[in-house]
Amino acid sequence: MLEEVAAVRIGCPQPHLLTVSGLGAWRWECFYALLAPAVFDCPGYKRECNRKARGLSSILGKKIIVFRPGALGDTLLAFPALAALRRAFPTARLSVVGNAPALALARDAGLVDEVASFDLPHWAELFAEAGIRSAEARQALAGASLAVLWLRDSEGQAARNLRALGISTIVSAPGRPPEGARLHAAEYLLGTLASIIGADALAPAPALTLKPSDEANAWADGEWARRGLVGRSVLALHPGSGGRAKCWPPERFAALADGFIAAGWRVLVIEGPADGLAVRQTLALLPADATQAVAGVTLPQLAGLLARATLCVGNDSGVTHLSAMLGAPTLALFGPTDPVIWRPLGPRVRVVWPGAVAPMAALSAAEVAHAAQMLLG
């Protein structure tokens, strides 16, 4: 049975450890209520978080470093939490280590000041028993008084190594909600920050919408004209994803696109680094005079194109998360992953999900076309 899912807040007692120089270590738990109007409903808990946050404001320096490794979608879901850090510490220099191309979008949006790749060899020293010794890592960490670790550090080695370099405040939590907790990943990451920015700061904020950079917009304007898309209704399809089980069949994408082409639309088929086969199979089923592939573009350039699309339809993928956060009408097709946890964030998003056990092929082209029409109004 077709199921359309909206994001909800549900019960998630999850302990986190916050260690503050001079204040000792203390544990807190975050509680989320189903469909609660605010993130935190417990007045006592909110008072405690706010008290701790006020205490921290006097000891935090002017540099914050955040570690958030992960793919494009994982990185984008951290943007609301990065925005919350920016609001709480507007004069701090915010540096983020993770997926550098994706994080560059946050830098361009003014959410962070500098980005670096977590794949650089010296960051392996985070987990080294001998500590952090390389000049590159030490230079990147110099001056930081707050570190946020959104990664798996079950033995606390990374936190110990950072503390040994004099970083006075460390928040460490896994990069995703605990197993079995149906809590949206963005809200989970926000929850890990309550003890440093205060629970009141985590109340639902206006939706975060990215805008392509001026340079990306200029490029996209020219590319849109070159492809003959000015004044056209354009359907952007992303038939790929991180795994085959997450992919709607190419023939279904083609059947969906045929209906829009018959109504005069043009189709762009987006190809990411691992999407070659799915894109080729989809293109082979579509008329060449109404369909174009998009491949080999940078992430900012892709953002410029997606922001211009009339409708974006894709699997649970980073490209779909990007189109949603850009404000483009986005229809996200979910399969084995839970949309309650991984739903894309954006002002015009609709999720279609056949259920936790049904395969992606259980979604018919007619069902998805109906959802698209509902989204477009």
Image (spheres, helix red, strand yellow):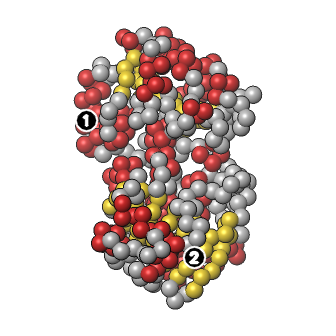
Q: Is residue 84 visible?
A: yes
Point out the tag, 2 or 1, that comes first from the N-terminus: 2
Q: CA distance from mark 2 to mark 1?
A: 45 Å
What amino acid is at disc 2?
Answer: Leu
Q: For residue 246, which numbered disc appears in the image?
A: none
Q: Position of residue 362 (x, y in %)?
A: 68, 24
Q: Residue at x 50, y 81 (%)?
A: 56
- Disc 1 target residue: 219
Is the Cβ of the residue at disc 2 closer than 8 Å to that at disc 1?
no
Q: Residue at x 27, y 44 (%)?
A: 214
Q: Position of residue 219 (x, y in %)?
A: 25, 35
Position of 364 with respect to 130 (left or right) is right
Q: Callout 2: helix, strand or loop? A: strand
Q: For residue 18, which numbered disc appears in the image?
A: 2
Q: Residue at x 56, y 32 (%)?
A: 244
* In the depicted structure, whether residue 232 falls above or below residue 272: above
Q: Residue at x 48, y 68 (%)?
A: 127
Position of 218 with respect to 372 (left or right) is left
Q: Callout 1: helix, strand or loop? A: helix
* In the depicted structure, whether residue 245 falls above or below residue 265: below
What amino acid is at disc 1?
Answer: Trp
Q: Is residue 47 visible?
A: no
Q: Nearer the viewer, residue 328 or 279?
A: 279
* In the depicted structure, whether residue 256 falls above or below residue 311: above
Q: Position of residue 38 (x, y in %)?
A: 65, 60
Query: Which residue of the protein is positioned furthest toward the bottom in this rendering?
Result: 22
Q: Residues within 10 Å of mark 1 (few under 14, many from 20)?
A: some
Q: Residues within 10 Å of mark 2 (few under 14, many from 20)?
A: many
Q: Nearer the viewer, residue 56 or 21?
A: 21
Position of 347 with respect to 212 (left or right) is right
Q: Position of residue 66 (x, y in %)?
A: 44, 65
* In the depicted structure, whether residue 302 falls above or below residue 168: above
